[in-house]
Image (tube, coloured by chain):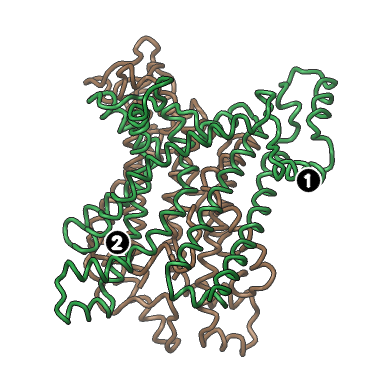
Chain colours: A green, B brown
Amino acid sequence: MGDQVTGYVLKRLGLALLTLVLLSMIIFFAGQVLPGNPGRAILGPFASQHAVTALDNSLGVNRSLPAQYWSWVSGIVQGNLGTSYQFRAPVSSFLWPALGRSLRLAVVAFVLVVPLSIVGGVVAALSRGRAPDRVISVAGLSLSSMPEFVSGVVLIVVFAIELKWLPVTASAPAGSSLPTQIRYLLLPAIVLVLVLFGYIMRMARAGTIEALDSDYVRTATLKGLPRSVVIRRHVLRNSLLPTITVIATQTGYLIGGLVVVETLFNYPGLGRLIFTAITDKDFPMLEAGVLTIGIVYLVATLVADILYTLLNPRLRLQAAD
Amino acid sequence: MAHAAPRDYLAAAPGVSPDSPALLSDPAAIGLPPPASPPPSTDGGAGGAAGALDVSSRRIRREQMRLLLRSAPFIVGMVLLLWWVVCAIFGRLFVPYNPVNGSLLQFNLAPSGTHWFGTDSLGRDVLSRVIVGSREILIVSVLATVLGTALGTALGLVMGYFRGIVDNVVGRLVDAVLSLPVVIVALLFVAAVGPSARTLILVIGFVFALIIARTVRTAVLQERELDYIAAARLRDESGAHIMFVEILPNISAPILVEFTVRLGYAIFAIATLSFLGIGIQPPTPDWGADIAASYQYLAAGYWWETLFPALAIASLVVAVNLIADSIEAVVIR
C-alpha cells in the first residue's frame, strides 16, 4: 500500500514538473519573444540605435532563443530571477517581500471563507430546493462570477465611505499592531471571500447532497439514528473530503485574483507587482511574478491531489494503476 | 460529463469533478421546475432508430425550450441581456448626452434631474457612458467566445477521436495554461503585444479554445465507444465525416453549455483587463476603464462615477450566468 501511494506521488510529481517546464516556455515566449525589441521598448522611440544595441547587448537579448531560455531557466533554478528593467535591481529583492504580503492577505481571506462557505454549502444542501438553498445558491453563483473590482468598489462605497467602518486602503501605517494590520486587510480579504465563497460553497453543497442521496445514509436513517448523528457521522465525513481539496486548489486562483484586489486597495503585494510590471513593461519582473503564480498553483493542486489520495481509502487503492 | 469547470483555475483533481452530479444540474436549486418526462437524452448516446431519432430529438428540443421559458432565472437573465444588447446596438441613438465629449465645466456633478447618474471628472454624462459602454465589451466577449468555441470544438473532436500525439501534446499544453488564471494569461500576452480589441479576442479565444477542447474531448471519448460510431466506421466513413457529422450533433448540449458559461468568463476577463488598463482603451466608453479612471475619487465622495458602471457590469455578468445556469440545468441530464 505504501509503495502504491509513493508511486502515485512520484507520477504526479513528474507530471507537475512537465507542466511547469511547459508553463515556463509559454511565459518565456510571451515575455521575451512577443514584445520584440526590449532595448527599444525601454529606451523609447527617440533613443539612438547605438544606445539600443548597447542595451540589448547588456541585457543579453540578442542571443539565440534557446540560449536565452536556457540562461533564464537555469538562473531561476539557482534562485536568480533576473534583473528588473525598471529598477535595475534583482527581481527577487522585490518579489519575495511582495509574495509575503500577498500571503498575509490570502491567509486572512482563507480564515474567513473556509468556515463560511462550508456552513453555507451544508445549509443549502440540507434545505435543498427550498428558500435558503435558492438564496445561497443564486447569491453564491452571482458573487463568484463578479469581477473583483466590481464587488470591491461596491464594498468600498458601503463600508469604507458611507459607514466608515473600515479603511479604504489595505496597508496599515508602519509599525502598527497586528490587530490594526488585520483590520486594514479585512475589506480586500472580504472581496476575495465573496469570489471564493460561491465556489467552495457549491462543492460543499454538491458533496453533501451526494452523501445525503447515498445508500449508507438511507441505511443510517432507517436504522433509527437521530438526524443530527446521521449528518455529523455519515454525511459530513464524506461530503467534506472533496471540499478540502477544492479549498487547496483555490490558493492558485487566490494569488491570481490578487492582481485586481491589490491594485484596487493599493496593497504592495505580488498582484500589484505584476500590475506595475505590466504598466512599466518590466518583463523580467512580469515573467517572474507570473511564474510564481503558476508554481503556487501547481504546488497547491499537487498537495490537494496527494491529500485527497491519502484521505480517501478508495482512491488509495486505485492509485496503483 | 466533465464540462464547465466553474472558474478556469480549476484543473480537476482526481475525483474532484468540479461539476459533481448535484452541482449545477439540480434544477430545483435555481428555481426550475423538475424536468418533465421524457428525460432529454441528447447527451450520453442518443442511440435509437434513425427515423425515430429525428422526431424525438425535435420534441426534446421543444420540451427543453418550454422548460427554459418557464424558469424565472432564465427570463430575468434574458431580459437583462437583451437590454444591454439593445444598448450596444442602438445606444448611441437614445443617449441623453454625447458619451465621449462632455462639457468640461460640468464635471463631477452629483446625480440630478438633468444628469440622472451624474457626470464624471471630464464632465461626461455617466448615464450616457453606461449605456454606450455595453457595446465594446459585448462585441469583444462574444467574438472571443465564438472563436474559442469553434476552435475548441474542432480541437476537442480531433483530440478525442484520434487520441495519440495531438491528444497528449494539447493535453499537456492545456494543463500548463490552466495552471494560471485566465486573466493572468491574458495580462501576460496582451502586455506583450499591446492592447487592442483584436488582441483581446485572439488571446481570450485561444485560452478558451484550450479549455473547451478538454470538455469536448471528454464528451467525444464517451461517444466514440457507441454503436453508431462503429456502424459509421464499418460504412467506411472518413474521420472528418464521423467527427463533424456523426459525433458533433450528439455533443451539442455540452458545447452549448460551455459557450454560455465561457461568455460569462469572457465578460469577467475583459472587464477586468479594462480595469487594469490593458483592455478596452479610453476614450471608448467602457465600464471597466471608466471604473479605473474614477475609483480614486471614491474617497472624495464622487461615488456615482464608479458605482453605476460597476452595477452595469454586475447586471450583465449576473444575466449571462443566470442564462448559462438555466440552460445547463435543462440541457444536461
The furthest residue to the front: A2
Circle 2: residue type:
Arg
Identified at 39% across, 17% down, the residue is B121
Q: Does B317 sit above or below residue B96?
A: below
Front-lying residue, A320 or B189: A320
Q: Are marks 1 and 2 on the same chain?
A: yes
The dot on residue A70 is: 1
Circle 1: residue type:
Trp
Q: Which residue is mark 2?
A: A205
Apparent side of residue B6 relative to residue A36 in the rendered image (left or right): left
Identified at 81% across, 33% down, the residue is A60
Within-10-Å neighbours for mark 1: few <14, some 14–19, many 20+: few
Q: Is label 1 in contact with label 2 (beta carbons under 8 Å)?
A: no
* Residue A288 x/y as whole percent: 63, 39
Asked if residue B85 shows in the view, the reply is no
Quadrant in the picture for the C terminus of chain A: bottom right
Asked if residue A59 shows in the view, the reply is yes
Front-lying residue, A63 or A77: A77
